[in-house]
Amino acid sequence: MNAESPLAVSPAPLELHVPEPAARPGDAPDFSHLHIPPAGIVPRPATDAPESSMRELPYQLIRVLDGQGKAVGPWNPKLSAERLRHGLRTMLRTRAFDERMVRLQRTGKTSFYIKSTGEEAIGVAQAFALNRDDMCFTSYRQQGLLFARDWPMVDLICQIFNNRKDRLKGRQLPVLYSAREAGYYSLSGNVGSRFPHAVGWAMASAYKRDTRIASAWIGDGTSAEGDFHYALTFASVYHAPVILNVVNNQWAISTPQAIAGGNEATFASRALGFGLPGLRVDGNDFLAVYAATEWAAERARRNLGATLIELYTYRAAAHSTSDDPSKYRPEGEANAWPLGDPVERLKQHLIGLGEWSEERHAAVIAEAEEEVRAAVKEAESHGTLHSGDDDLESLFEDVFETMPQHLRDQLDELRSIG
């Protein structure tokens, strides 16, 4: 046998690589492996620049707020102080709402809830950068978008309670909101559907010569599903006017983002294979999130096609009220996240501008908590999870345009025993 033949060399056994998080329960939080560049160093290309000229962007991190809370660099959107104050108030309202809803779930007034703690800048800042009538296909941590669009809290709480005033009649999980008038497409527990639905809606908008664009959100884990790739293919081929957001909050329930390929390449870099611009953004920086979204929205409105945005953040709370993160990540990891808290960072920026204070901040928190308390009281007057006054006949509605005979028979039977 030829000595140089591959068969002449005893092969080494193959090894399967299974990604592991940097730290597990009982370990100290460890983010030493992350590279966080200084704020303000990433160039901002013109919105009509060709994708081929910005292929380094998916590997960088767009940041505007530096360690002292100052806005620096070419991505600074230079928002007015009033706009920034409005953004901070909206994030505080969102956080107050989340905290109260979890307490209500713990007392049995609803069955389930998901908080957006640590991710409030994403829903709120992106809502500010979009037009109110742009259609949003969200995941379940963008409730701040609805508060930014002044959607009534009472309506959301009634959906959470699935009570008599729930417009969805209890047919959705409590946090899967629907608000057509706010440009908030019915939320789906099948999160991967957000991307193809948004791309299809955007294609239809362009086909009809409308002026509205679409935006969609998924998590890092969902990017490993086929829906992600199908959507990017159609968005690329048809130049769909859509913004596709991957919220990389480091955890897909108990699975680290590395399982979805986050350690091999950034999620933003997946845009490159489809000829789309990819932006990687500090998701805890209100100004950076706004600026990147504004850039992508302008590109879509100018018929220049879709943009993929990776929002680099951390899920500070449990995945949901059904989850216990102490089982899979170290205690205190959220507090060690190197990009900080989006609320605190915007607060410090405004204080530095002389447009905010600790006293004003405390007062707004108190106002937000009172607003939520009043909304809960009103919603509770229409029933909660165990009110016992459900309209069972509504089970037969909104399925068929004309009720078939077998359902009519079942409805008659229900009435006969009621």
Image (cartoon, rainbow, N blue to C red):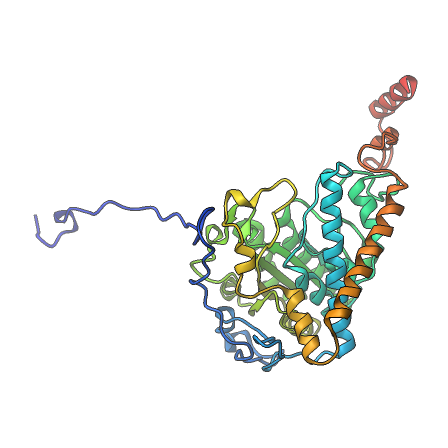
Residue pictured at 27% horizontal, 46% vertical: 14
Please count the marks in the image: 0
Residue pictured at 61% horizontal, 65% vertical: 284
Quadrant where the C terminus lies? top right
Location of residue 221 with respect to 107 vertically, above or below: below
Q: Is residue 20 left or right of residue 215?
A: left
Residue 22 sits in which quadrant? Answer: bottom left
Location of residue 113 with respect to 240 vertically, above or below: above
What is the residue that sits farthest to the front in this orientation? 359
- Front position in the image: 130 or 313: 313
- Front position in the image: 416 or 37: 37
Q: Is residue 293 visible to the viewer in this orientation of the structure?
A: no
> Could you tell me residue 149's position as x and y percent?
80, 62
Q: Is residue 123 visible to the viewer in this orientation of the structure?
A: yes
Residue 305 sits in which quadrant? Answer: bottom right
> Could you tell me residue 150's position as x and y percent?
83, 61
> Could you tell me residue 397's position as x and y percent?
85, 34
Q: Is residue 407 left or right of residue 125?
A: right
Q: Is residue 239 left or right of residue 204?
A: left
- Front position in the image: 344 or 149: 344
Location of residue 401 with respect to 263 vertically, above or below: above
> Could you tell me residue 353's position as x and y percent?
70, 81
